[in-house]
Amino acid sequence: MQNDTPLRRNRRPTHPGKILREHYLVPRGITQTALAADLGISTKHLSRIVNGHARIDSTLAAKIAKVLETTTQFWVNLQAKIDAWDAEQETANWQPANVYPAKLAVA
């Protein structure tokens, strides 16, 4: 028996900045200062990302992907998971005034 219900998380997904730091910067010996210069952003902005206080937008995701030889989609997906989690938490108690279910097609 297959369950198609998505798995519910009880915790916020890992921020892409933490993944950037722990899986790319530290193992490769790359400093935040060096990476920020290579990405064309301030060290302060990169620090905010690495510490989970700032988002990675799609343009920055593309630059990170090129510098670290990953994919843009990888970084965009990590950020999207955070954004979706935050949105679900913010709207947890919100109820719509109306719900419009999809109609079933009649054969």
Image (cartoon, grey):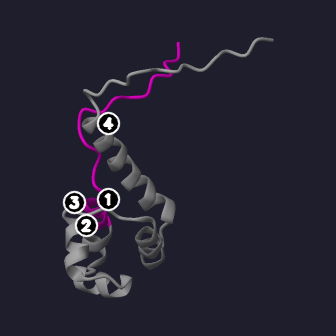
- Label annotation for residue 91: none
Give the residue number, with chain letter if any, for mark 3.
52
Identify the mark nearer the N-term, 1 or 4: 1
Q: How many marks?
A: 4
Give the CA distance from mark 2 to mark 3. 5 Å
Q: Is residue 99 left or right of residue 15?
A: right
| The magenta segment | 1-23
Label 3 vs label 4, nearer the camera: 4
Judging by the rendered image, the residue that carries numbered circle 2 is 49
Tag 2 and tag 3, C-beta contact below 8 Å: yes
User: Quadrant of residue 40 in the image?
Assistant: bottom left
Type of amino acid at the residue the image marks with label 3: Gly
Residue 32 found in image quarter: bottom left
Q: Amino acid at mark 4?
A: Glu
Q: Which residue is mark 4?
A: 88
Mark 1 vs 2, N-terminal side = 1
Residue at x-position 25% and y-position 67%:
49
What residue is shown with label 1? 16
Badge 1 vs badge 4, beta-carbon distance below 8 Å: no
- Residue 68, horizontal then vertical, whole percent: 42, 74
